[in-house]
Image: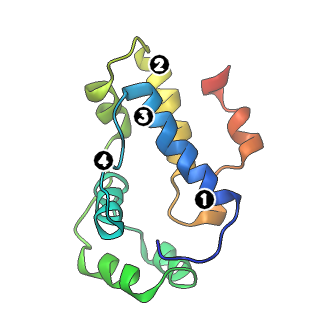
Amino acid sequence: MGSNRYDCSIDIWSTGCILFELVTRTPLFPGDAEGLQILEQAQIKGMPDKREMAELGKICEAPVMQLFNRNEHFGEVDLVEIMMANSRSRYSREDIVQAADLIEKCLKWVPKERITATDALNHPFFR
């Protein structure tokens, strides 16, 4: 997202992407350029709301914010349905629902709102 601030929340985002790929055996955001990645993220997650945009404006570079501002029409999609459609694994729907919940908690637009590693390990998906 063009931020030069690195903390554990970036690893949590990555963990959410990896978990999606482990369950479905396909990448969640396969783009290979930063702008394309952000658009792919918005297509899945929906655009950040006004509150999230204000928070992101504090940590993201101007070109990223401009990209968000030019593409306000994306709405969030149902991650469970995407995972069910793309899953080539033997996970049950219940497992996929739990995995999707955990992934959604990892992929919050605002880094400080993402689930912590400790809370993620205690998530029902791992029980």
Please state which of residues 77 and 111 is positioned toward the viewer in this rendering: 111
In contact (CB < 8 Å): disc 1 and disc 3: no
Task: Please tell me which residue is depicted at 50% across the width and 63% down the height of the picture.
Answer: 109
> Taking the image as drawn, is residue 47 in sight?
yes
Q: Is there any visible trace of residue 114 in the rendered image?
A: no
Residue where numbered disc 3 is placed: 21
Residue position for label 2: 94
The amino acid pointed to by label 1 is Ile
**Nearer-N-terminus badge (4/2):** 4
Label 2: how many Cα within 10 Å (few below 14, some 14–19, many 20+): few
Which residue position is annotated with label 4?
A: 77
Q: Secondary structure at mark 4?
A: loop
Describe the element under mark 1 as helix, strand or loop.
helix
User: Please, what secondary structure does the residue beneath circle 3 have?
Assistant: helix
x and y percent of residue 45 in the render?
A: 37, 55
Q: Amino acid at mark 4?
A: Val
Viewer-nearest residue: 84 or 9: 9
> Can you say whether 73 is above or below 124 in the image?
below
Q: Residues within 10 Å of mark 3 (few under 14, many from 20)?
A: some
Q: CA distance from mark 1 to mark 2?
A: 27 Å
Q: Residue at x 30, y 55 (%)?
A: 31
Density class for disc 4 (Cα within 10 Å; few <14, some 14-19, many ≥20) is: few
Residue at image coords 50%, 80%: 60
Mark 4 to mark 2: distance in Å?
Answer: 18 Å
Q: Quadrant of the C terminus?
A: top right
Earlier along the polypeptide chain: callout 4 or callout 1? 1
Q: Residue at x 51, y 35 (%)?
A: 19
User: What's the distance in space between the residues labelled 1 and 3, CA to CA?
Assistant: 17 Å
Using the image, tell me which numbered label, if any, was put on residue 10: 1
Query: Which sits earlier in the primary sequence, circle 3 or circle 2?
Result: 3
